[in-house]
Image (cartoon, rainbow, N blue to C red):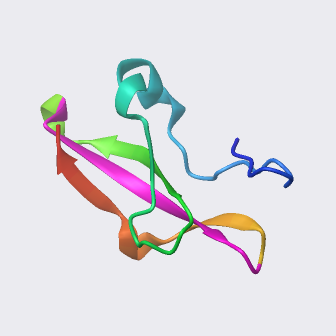
Amino acid sequence: MVQRQGADAQRLTGINPALYPDFQKVFFRVQDKNRDGLNEIAVLAGTSFGATELCYDVFHYSLKQGIFERRWEDFYCTSH
């Protein structure tokens, strides 16, 4: 669940909670990657064999709709 100040709570879809126990420290990333003044939420979506790469779904906040939306084009993987 995520919630912006003054807004309703929202459940992010497609999250794999089974990864959380082993990857708590890197499960969520919050940053303004596109420099629009709003933070995006990156959520761990999967790992490579041996967890050498971590792959993230990215959710952007839509001011128009008042919710976080997944943007498939921003999916990324990074070395762990």
- Placement of 37 over or under 24, stated as above or below: below
Where does the image place residue 64, in percent across and percent down from the top left?
76, 81
- Which residue corresponds to the image point at 63% horizontal and 53% vertical from the top-left? 13
- Which residue corresponds to the image point at 42% horizontal and 35% vertical from the top-left? 27
Say which quadrant the C terminus sits in.
top left
Which residue is at the front of the view, 63 or 55?
63
Quarter location, residue 79 = top left
Residue 60: within the magenta? Answer: yes
Residue stretch rendered in magenta on the structure: 51-64
- Placement of 68 over or under 53, stated as above or below: below
- Which residue corresponds to the image point at 74% horizontal and 52% vertical from the top-left? 4
Quarter location, residue 63 = bottom right
View extreme (top): residue = 21
Where does the image place residue 28, in percent across and percent down from the top left?
46, 40
Residue 71: within the magenta? Answer: no
The reply, left or right, for residue 54 in relation to residue 13 is: left
- Placement of 64 over or under 9, stated as above or below: below
Figure disc tally: 0
Where does the image place residue 57, in percent across and percent down from the top left?
43, 56
